[in-house]
Amino acid sequence: MTACHAGAPPQTSDAADLSAPAIALVGCPNCGKTALFNALTGSRQKVANYAGVTVERKEGSFRTPAGRPVRVLDLPGTYSLRARSPDEEVTRDVVLGRRGGETAPDILVCVADATNLRLVLRLVLELKSVGTPLVLALNMMDIAKRQGVEINVERLSAELGVPVVPSVAVRRGGTQALLQEIDKLCLGGETLRGSNSWHPLEAGELRALHREAERILKACSFRPADNTLTGRIDRVLLHPVLGTAVLLLILFLMFQAVFAWAEPVMDLIEGSIGDLGALIGGLLPDGLLRSLLVDGIIAGVGSVLVFLPQILILFFFIILLEDFGYMARAAFLMDKIMGGAGLHGRAFIPLLSSFACAIPGVMATRVIDSKRDRLATILVAPLTTCSARIPVYTLIIAAFVPNTTVWGGFGLQGLTMFGLYATGILAALLVAAVLKRLVWREQPEPFLMELPSYKRPSLRNVALGLWQRGTIFLKRAGTIILTLSIVVWFLCTFPAPPADATAPAIDYAFAGMIGHWLEPVLAPIGFNWQIAIALVPGLAAREVMVSALGTIYAVAETGDAAAGALEPLLAAQWSLPTALALLAWYVFAPQCIATLAVVKRETNSWRWPTILFLYMLVLAYTASYAVFHISSALLG
Amino acid sequence: MSLLTNTSSTVRLGGGRRGLRGHVAGLSPVDVSGINRDELERRLIEMGFIEGARIELLHEGPFGRDPIAVRVDDTTVALRRRDANLVIVTVQEG
Ligand SMILES: Nc1nc2c(ncn2[C@@H]2O[C@H](COP(=O)(O)OP(=O)(O)OP(=O)(O)O)[C@@H](O)[C@H]2O)c(=O)[nH]1
Ligand SMILES: [Mg+2]
């Protein structure tokens, strides 16, 4: 098979053309594959998932200096083709051409961190056995030069038997040599694919290859005494006390940013959605269409869209810290605590993200390489208190918890809020421990992670990463969440109330029927039929519960004003045990269709969102039951 | 194996303290970790823990001094002590 099609007619579009030769970027984690991919393709890239697995698939296209269109694949980092995580399986299968529906790449570009060649040279030797034309790109040459690392490129190329080119992924023109090499490989169109003799390597073979890599490294490169900048930074950031303090400070900043900075933008979005609703409401005659558009679609999608600023800010921090090289340090510092719950140190970041919203949290689990660990993290992430619970917590706390201070200065209301957060975290760790120890009966996975040297993040990479996260989220809001909003609207609207209706319209609709039907089931945990009905639209998004209660108690105001008007009403109508039981319900209840949809997408099956929904439901019911009865007994 | 009997100058990496320097003497032939030993061995080799590699224990985790960050030749690797126990280090005095 030829590597490239020399005689192919010139392409008129830059869009991925399936007949164009395909290049796959392979290499150890953190060597700059994604940066190189971004440098080659600009924004001409498509992010999706590999079929059947939840590993991200990034494909893009570009033209070589000779004008040849080329497709590029960015692959997850790996130290060897012997796969042990879904990420690495994808890399292996793509490289070997084993992924169904995809042909093997025509050229492999092995990307190496020029300042850290030892491990990647072993990988190069392994990749040679695959038989696909191979180029070694010595990336991060700028850093290598600064550190005084010298590499004899010609000698290295001769020793390895593959072309070697230097590259700087984050600098304009830094990929010139690589592009020329790709053109050269394509030029004859005759580059024959060798035979594939790859097999999973045993320890002995690994050792032999490592020795060979060591020998080549000695012969071809010189590095001065250790680079100390990373070491000096680590002396602070990994210090048992200082490092932990810095980590807490960063977390505090992140929280501050997510909640404070996002606020004005969220208000703006909320306002615009309200305005849009009012505008369309004004244009259309009163009727079903208006109700569908305004109350169903705009309100439903809007209630999820308001989280976009929080999600972008959160991912801004995550991408920045990841690019800087800090995430691996955070995982190092938190590994003991996460390990206590049977989780990987890297699970810390997704769980943290979930405080803003479980959606980015679930999306951030992609950094966890063990499949089970990742699943466990996804399943417990929705237990941490997301910001959508805050409006509900605030309403009930304000109505039922007296605004007094206890234990010298702590506000009782604040303490209650803190208690709810703490319960969420504890529950997440406990459920993870149960999953890993009892359900899956797993030996803990080994935790081996390279601590990369610190780097100045590249703005362009951060921007591209944010753009990708944003579009993924928006696409989801546009499809699944749109559909579900319509379903919930339908349930709350049909059938229409009779002309002489006295109760609020929702009481006559399917939602009302479901509420009344649920009432006996929910009575043991202290919920009345009003709560039962409000739980139905609250499925779309937790905070919708507040406005639903407003509708049911026929409060004229909406949004924040509704909460203000509701407080005295609820305080008068609900017993304290009922209120406490509802708080307990909200700590655990799986009331967020968007989260379930994301879990479906990230795990590629309905199985896990179903399990998530059911286990959280059981927890919520049990907790509310216990809280209702214990508090009833105590309060006599 | 001699490298195991000569305890005066070899230690298991998992028991090492900050500042420990030396070379990898070998990977213990016995199962010390509870996980699949062959798999752990291969992972360790892939991260550069191979006979003769230069080792320095740089950092210890804040809780229970676990995990540890180890310099292995030019690479810094974080790992848990129980996994590090597979690695036997010839201590470099001074
Ligand atoms: N100075 C410099 N920095 C680079 C270069 N290439 C990549 N980086 C930076 O190195 C860091 C890691 O780069 P990535 O592209 O995320 O690495 P990756 O290989 O995709 O990592 P994984 O996907 O985790 O395997 C980022 O902060 C990049 O900005 C380079 O040539 N020079
Ligand atoms: Mg990458």
Image: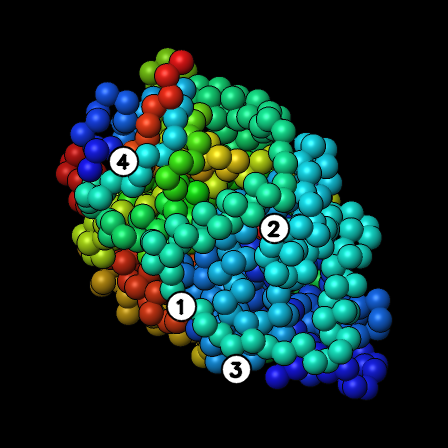
Q: Are marks 3 and 1 on the same chain?
A: yes
Q: Which residue lies under the disc numbered 3?
A: A101
Labels 2 and 4 share a subunit: no
Q: Quadrant of the C terminus of chain A?
A: top left
Q: What is the crowding at mark 3: few (fewer than 14 residues within 10 Å), some, or many (at least 20)?
A: few
Q: Answer yes or no: do the residues labelled 4 and 1 have beta carbons within 8 Å?
A: no
Rounded to the nearest angstrom, the CA distance separating label 4 from label 1 is: 29 Å
Q: Chain of mark 4?
A: B
Query: Mark 3 against mark 4, which lies toward the viewer?
Result: 4
Q: Secondary structure at mark 1?
A: loop
Mark 2–mark 1 contact, CB under 8 Å? no
Q: Amino acid at mark 4?
A: Asn
In the image, is residue A319 above or below residue A162? Answer: above
What separation in Å lies between label 3 and label 1 (alpha carbons)? 22 Å
On whether disc 3 and disc 4 are found on a single subunit, the reply is: no
Crowd class of label 1 (few under 14; some 14 to 19; many from 20; radius 10 Å): few
The lab-note entry on whether marks 4 and 1 share a chain reads no
Q: Nearer the viewer, residue A517 or A458?
A: A458
Disc 2 or 1, which lies upstream in sequence? 2
Three-letter residue code for mark 3: Gly
Left or right of B15? Residue A546 is right
Q: Quickly name the residue at label 2.
A: A112
Q: Are marks 3 and 1 in contact (CB under 8 Å)?
A: no
Please give left or right for residue A529 compared with residue A295 in the image.
left
Q: Residues within 10 Å of mark 4 (few under 14, many from 20)?
A: many
As helix, strand or loop, the secondary structure at mark 3 comes to loop
